[in-house]
Image (cartoon, coloured by chain):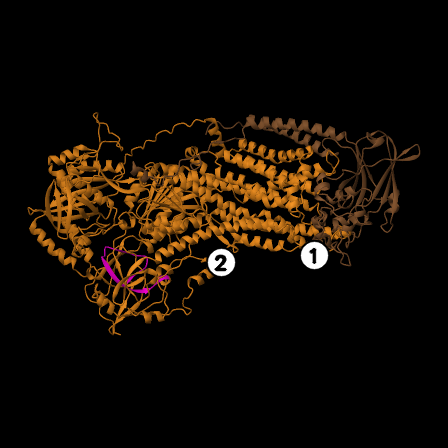
Chain colours: A orange, B brown
Amino acid sequence: MGSLLSRLGLECGGKAVKEEERHLRANDRELNLSYKYSDNAIKTSKYNIFTFLPLNLFEQFQRLANAYFLFLLCLQSIPEVSSLPWYTTVVPLVLVLSMTMAKDGSDDMNRHRCDKQVNNRQVEVLVEGELQSEKWMDVQVGDIVKLENNQFVTADLLLLSSSEPLNLVYIETAELDGETNLKVKQALTVTGKLEDSVEKLANFNGEVHCEPPNNRLDKFTGTLTLKGETYSLDNERILLRGCTLRNTQWCFGLVVFGGPDTKLMQNCGRTTFKRTSIDRLMNVLVLSIFGFLMIMCLFLAIGNGIWEYQEGSKFAAFLPKGVNAPFSAFLTFWSYVIILNTVVPISLYVSVEIIRLGNSFYINWDRKMYYPKNDTPAEARTTTLNEELGQIKYIFSDKTGTLTQNVMTFNKCSINGKAYGELLDFSGQRVEINEKTEKVDFSWNNLADPKFCFHDNSLVEVVRDGNPEVQAFFRLLALCHTVMPEEKKEGELYYQAQSPDEGALVTAARNFGFVFRSRTPESITVVEMGELVTYELLAVLDFNNVRKRMSVIVRSPEGKLTLYCKGADTIIFERLNPSCSNLTEVTTLHLNEFAGEGLRTLALAYKDIDPEYMEDWKLRHHVANTAMDEREEKLDALYEEIEKGLLLLGSTAVEDKLQDGVPQTIEQLSKADIKIWVLTGDKQETAENIGYSCNMLREEMNEVFIVSANTAEEVRKELQTARRKMTPDGTEEPTVKKSRSGLFCLQKTETVADEPVNGEYAMVINGHSLAFALEKDMEIELLRTACMCQTVICCRVTPLQKAQVVELVKKYKQAVTLAIGDGANDVSMIKAAHIGVGISGQEGMQAVLSSDYSFAQFRYLQRLLLVHGRWSYLRMCKFLRYFFYKNFTFTFVHFWYGFFCGFSAQTVFDEWFITLFNLVYTALPVLSLSLFDQDVNDWWSFQYPQLYTPGQLNQYFSKRAFVYTVLHSGYSSLVLFFIPWAAMYDTVRDDGKEIVDYQSFALLAQTCLLIAVSIQLGLDTHYWTAMNQFFLWGSLSVYFAVIFTMYSNGMFLTLTSSFPFIGTARNSLNQPNVWLTMLLTTVLCVLPVVAYRFLRILLWPTINDKVRYKVRQDKVLPATPRRVQARRTSTRRSGYAFSHAQGYGDLVTSGKFLRRTPKSRPALFSQTDSPLAQTQPQFYRTISEREEPPLSP
Amino acid sequence: MMKEELETTNRPDNTAFTQQRLPAWQPMLSAGIVIPGFVLIGLAFIGIGVALFITSQNITVLEKDYTGVETTSDCYKCSNPSDKNCTCKLEFSLSNLFEGPVFFYYGLSNYFQSQRSYGASKDEYQLSGDLDYFKTPISACSPYQYDANQNPIVPCGSLANSMFNDTFKLYQIVNGTKKLVPFDGKGIAWWTDYNIKYRNPSVTPLKNAFNGTVKPSFWSKPAYELDTSDPSNNGFVNQDFLVWMRRAALPDFRKLYRRITEGDYARGLPAGNYSLEIAYNYPVLSFGGRKKVVFSNVSWMGGKNQFLGIAYLVVGSLCVVMSMVMLIVYAKFKFPEDD
């Protein structure tokens, strides 16, 4: 209903009839307005000044708890039923409503501000033959708008013309689909002719017929009718709102859909709110409490019926009203519903929100999660999930930018059999390289990149000495690549590399004196040791995943033809001239050494080519290149033919720099029994490599299974083989536990049980196999195998698959999942997981915007989970246990009193006490417990990551714990009612006057209760800050201050009927037996708990108890032993340094892209940090140069 | 320098509060605290228990049921509710001095003053002397709000209406003659009730304030005639009325009727024979209630109540036993030193 109403508000003035087809004519506002299409204004806000109060109240009362309290309020207004005055409900209800209202109000203000900002963006619109700057919201369907580079697309536009050749425009669709690579759209040639002539555009009167507004981003059907000719329109002609224009000076578009009709807005579903498992449990509990409440009320009502029948009717002379027993029982039922409502106190929900908010603030405030380098503090973007952070069982992590810095550094190389990059001291020992190590001075090279650092001076000496091999090595690096240079100022070079490792290699060459300066489709200009040399670029034999190498063929100014090739070592070695065998051996040794350090290697080779052969080859190449069929195969064969008999130059080793502390974090998290799965778009080699370098894959593992089959059957077989290897005597059939959960047990859940495994295994699965494995019939197989492994790495996965993997684990493991990533391709997984974490402070904000928590470094994850998450969970559970204890105890006392007041719904306590108990007397102490409590401090939390495991097993608060709590409060309430009852029975004051009157008894019972629950709170508190002390003792003092005030003469004389308890406090609290009774109840409530806990710690100590004991033992924190990262000695060959799948060769050599000088060219690949940009083939459509034939009408 | 400041604008404050490093006391339930604690609490409780028990033992209570259920009872004749103005006698003898000051209570059983609508059926404003409420009593008093002729009832409500109206006279039989034991009816109600909570309207004579009102239907005389001899004990500040209006929490209760503090009885009731004359007016048999009279003296801890003393003794002993158990368990399962 609420959403319906707001929708109505949103579409106020919209069309009543459903649109069948959209028809519009360019530059004809009158006609277009007659269709009453929505204009371009958007409205995401929910309320305005007038609708705020009613709508918000309406929405709030849709919440079960609020509605329940409204219902109670209605009950209380019936005098026959009302057992409590109205203020006991109104005061808390108003408090809750106004707090929520304030929050909703401020949220909506933000949305209003946001809408206003978007609606007031300026765009140039063609109005009456002139370009005018107008606000976005004033743009109408049928208007022609002009967009400039880097502007947001105003509405869904039909592209008319653009500044680029062939009427192309480049757009980035990150906001729409999360993909950051550029996409190409092309206008119809017929409209492209309009160019930027305002006159022509103003006279353009094409008519568009197209589909009605819908949410399909990849589809558009329509026609454009111009001068009697009809042209078909498809998605390629449409610019969608939400995209950004890139690398295009200007373009013109015709508005087709505006504002709420745009595909972006049509896709804006309501965001689904994530709920924590505690939330869900709480809902179930609250519901069962309701049931329990009803049973209690029913019991008491029946009791009342019997009492009325047996006693009341005979007692009628003294009773105010003689009513018949069943009716009285009926009324009593509702009266008890009012009295016993404290089992589900409204303040529970408020308190939970406050606690979560407070714990979120701690995350924002944490200096240890603040990254000074880019001034980014951690941020809890969702404030309702904190305790879930303490229950994480599975982490799904992206690789690039999350585990790694996405910074590649040229670290080492081997040239002509000599390794460089290692730093040795005088005795020949390796020197650990750290930030303080002296860097190589590149000041001799004024084109050097100042950020580049290298530590081995010998390489510079060699290259400056003019060693031909070393020079050839760097020449190769400067020539053989597809990097785009950008020289904004003379001497200030920027490289636009498709992948950061390519950039790293070219930068290395640059610093060592082989500066790649500029390129045209036919040439590459390099400054070689200060000398400008221009090479003629004859061919680029591009990289792809199968070839695993790339080559260029260049002609030097001297006319020498050379092929330079770099690629995966295994591939290169196969194509070497046999004369290199000695060098190959040495280089292989070096490669192994590099690989052992987790570096990404490439082998470099070259070959001089005979000019005649080249002529012939070029001819064949041209033929193959223009072949209509089997073009790829023919080209591959040609490449294969020429890349033979190469001469080895050496190899490079590039470090894919891990973020600081990643291996340690992973180690800590796995100690906390959290399973980490890496889901990356990168290729298998790279992913494995990172797996090793961050200690997820280890040499000592029993086996690393690699699943990379190409058919469903093979994938299944590989998974099964792996599983059988891990559990030779395990069952074939998975043990699936089916159960029901949720409200009314409506949700069916299936849980696949964990299976024990001997030894450590890991699994690497690629995207292709994953696609098969995620099919319905194989997903459990995948899950079983994967969950047995310590480490799971999925490589080459698409964003959708990432989400599917997360969903799979969520579905069958019923475990709490966390996804962490930095890029747009992680958005789906971040949204799918229970908790999404974004790495902030980098360029792309997509992941952060859809995340629940964000911080700058992966290593902060351990603090988020092991400290903040653990504490939040602990606090929330303590809070809930205590809160239910307190309120059940409170309520049960009323239940017992029922037996002594004829089940007449007489409250035991003063009405003011009932009103203030949760709101004032116990609110702050319990809040301070749940905001400040910690079992052990953060340092110890890191020392013992095992402390995290109770959260994963739901040990601190579950249905079981709840039942214990209820039993405990049952006991306490018995003590709290019957001890005062027995102690006061037939007794009098020390002056013979009355003490067992109702008011004195109420005072005694409520004071006993308050003291007992306060002391119980003290028992639950592990961490007594000054605040805890202050609030606990303060609240008790406030209680006494309040009762003495409320029971004072003054209060009675001002508000006689509201404060009838006058004098009770004075008369009761000066009696020793009253105080002795309080002492007795308190001791009886508390000591059994103390004894139980003491014995439990002795007999069945939990990990918490042990650590807390240990903390007591050594108060002085021992220094953390410095962990030294062991160097691996491995024969495993690491991934070759190409993190992309398909080169840019076509692009580089196609003249179209380089028509303008590279200097003025804006960044083409501006977002290379996105893994997607590196891993997804950059798909550029073949651009047809023919004119579209008009469709026959 | 400036640059550095700019760069760290988002750095969170380094306070103990924001960094969750507030200094704190972290107690633990260690054996060194718990076991001696239990012993100490146990011993203290046993001490208190003994004191309470002895005190309670020293209190003398004399309880006599006079409902008249048994046919042997003198009050049997009065148990028929149709019998008005019936008087009966209750005789008892004391072998020892009943040490004073002696308090004389009447007690009712199975009487639900704690019933909600019964308790709510009164008008605080009326009882604090607000004349507006004399004319229109609040509706909670219904059906004792107006009489059949729509005259307001003052004091209204069932609580006032059902005021206990048996009266007692105690005689000591000295040598065959009845000697009246003087009763002190002053100061038997709470000071706050008498001085603040209940007020007569400031109209003299008091009777005029009640013009146009009727007395509660069960009452034999209107409120302004409750004690015509003493204006300060009349109307709403009549001590018996105040005692009744302080409703009991439990269905079995006793209420102070008189104190015996004067004359020959200032030291208590001497040994001898006594006769209590009861004006039996209050019907309780219809609902299975019981009426009784209680003579009792008090101590520093109030009236006689064995429970508190015994409870303290039991809890104290349990604590000591528990501390032994814990000691044994502790000795056997000492906390694991390492791990």
Q: Residue furthest front?
A: B204
**Magenta stretch holds residue A244:** yes
Question: Residue sitting at 36 percent across and 50 percent down?
Answer: A827
Quarter of the rendering containing residue A777? bottom left
Is any part of residue B73 visible from this angle? no
- State the CA–CA distance, disc 1 to disc 2: 38 Å
Image location of residue A842, percent across then percent down: 31, 45
- Give percent across and percent down for residue A63: 52, 54
Q: Identify the residue position indicated by label 1 in the image.
A: A327
Cβ atoms at labels 1 and 2 below 8 Å apart: no
Local secondary structure at mark 1: helix
The answer to whether A598 appears left or right of A363 in the picture is left
The three-letter code of the residue at mark 1 reads Phe
Q: Which of labels 1 and 2 is toward the front?
A: 2
- Quickly name the residue at label 2: A55
Q: Along the polypeptide, which appears first: circle 1 or circle 2?
A: 2
Q: Are marks 1 and 2 on the same chain?
A: yes
Task: Report x, y in % for residue A687.
Answer: 30, 44
At a point 67% along the width and 28% down the height, the residue shown is B46
Q: Which residues are magenta?
A: A238-259
Q: Which amino acid is tagged 2?
A: Leu
Q: What percent of the width, then of the height, locates residue A191?
A: 23, 66
